[in-house]
Image (cartoon, coloured by chain):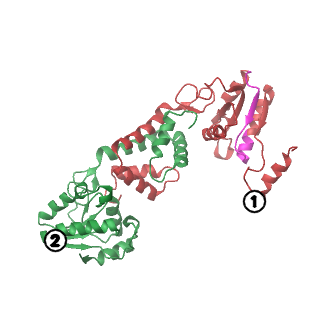
Chain colours: A green, B red
């Protein structure tokens, strides 16, 4: 806003503009919408933003974001705890849950191996996955990383670590179009991929 | 988020989904982005949101949002204070400032007359505009409401109020938008352009 160059309005535009998919024009439109929106609505949004940083942390078991010690999936006694599905990010858990075709647990890596970006095994939650498998409760680990070079590489790396532990390692069937992103796959594609999983 | 139906993550998605142009998918994508964003960035956004509601109020002169008593335009001694441009909303001030072709002051109505929506003169900042004009300092009031039925109606209403005060009342020129193509101009645009033609 030219008229208040260093003021609170410009600051909000600047902060909104950092969000993905929100360019300068959108940030300006949103800011003017918020200027006229009810005070309570804007405070609720501000509070919800604070809350996700103050109250959300990784589940102590699977590393999925939760406001409890364990996420609702890990805490659900109905889930099959002999089965663990390894995903790159929390959104992949949501996508798989939405497909309704999986009743096991998850493990969220919070990324994928990417040597060029300096992301090695120690940046992911691989140690915690190994610890889970070593308890002996888990019989099968399903690799559900993205069907990309880095996702496949991550799965391959994990399978070499998991093999010696005597656990069955599978990966999602290639019903997924290579190069696509898991979170945008529809339920049927995910269901097919789960059903056709193969030993790595 | 299916797995935490009443939790803080779902609440943030819900709040983001109230914003214009942000549907459920975008709200979900933004939420997961924010979950992984640096804590300080999210807190800055939350703080900027609170600030616009706590620190921003209408300029005591022109009603443009400001964090000071007077906005930077009204407080600028370089501006021509005999000229007032009446606009519907703060964004119109920004648009006019961006054009760089206006050096007078503004008056923000914060809406337009819209009897069907129950918006009458008392919902707008018309009283304050009248008080400004009555001080005798203002020589010309330029109507810059939107070129719509409601915008035109608002300008017409204001001109009947301002006429008796002896101030000159003008409105922005109507015609072809610069850079447009004549064959795509609608009949109203062409009628306006013909009516307002000037000697070359």
Magenta segment boundaries in residue numbering: B136-154
Crowding at mark 2 (Cα within 10 Å: few <14, some 14-19, many 20+): few
x and y, in percent, of residue A148 in the image? 35, 68
| Quadrant, the N terminus of chain A | top right
- Between B190 and B200, which is closer to the camera in this rendering? B200
Whether residue A84 is visible to the viewer of this picture, yes or no, is no
x and y, in percent, of residue B64 in the image? 60, 33
- Between B70 and B180, which is closer to the camera in this rendering? B180
Q: Which residue is mark 1?
A: B184
Task: Tell me the residue at 38%/64% (across/down).
Answer: A183
x and y, in percent, of residue A18 in the image? 45, 47
x and y, in percent, of residue A65 in the image? 29, 54
Task: Tell me the residue at 57%/36% (across/down).
Answer: A2
Q: Does label 2 lie on the same chain as label 1? A: no
To which quarter of the image does residue B154 belong? top right
**Residue A163's disc number:** 2
Whether residue B67 is visible to the viewer of this picture, yes or no, is yes
Q: Chain of mark 2?
A: A
């Amino acid at each position: 806003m030219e008229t208040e160059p260093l003021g609170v309005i410009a600051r909000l535009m600047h902060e909104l503009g950092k969000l993905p998919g929100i360019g300068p024009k959108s940030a300006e439109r949103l800011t003017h919408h918020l200027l006229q929106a009810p005070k309570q609505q804007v405070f609720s949004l501000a509070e919800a933003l604070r809350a996700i940083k103050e109250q959300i942390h990784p589940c102590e078991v699977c590393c999925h974001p939760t406001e409890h010690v364990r996420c609702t999936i890990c805490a659900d006694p109905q889930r099959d705890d002999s089965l663990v599905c390894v995903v790159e990010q929390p959104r992949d858990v949501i996508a798989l849950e939405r497909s309704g075709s999986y009743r096991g647990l998850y493990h969220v890596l919070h990324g994928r191996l990417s040597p060029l970006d300096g992301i090695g095994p120690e940046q992911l939650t691989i140690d915690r996955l190994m610890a889970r498998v070593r308890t002996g409760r888990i019989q099968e680990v399903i690799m559900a990383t993205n069907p990309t070079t880095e996702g496949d590489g991550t799965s391959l790396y994990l399978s070499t670590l998991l093999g010696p532990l005597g656990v069955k390692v599978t990966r999602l069937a290639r019903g997924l179009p290579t190069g696509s992103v898991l979170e945008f796959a529809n339920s049927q594609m995910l269901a097919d991929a789960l059903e056709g999983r193969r030993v790595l």
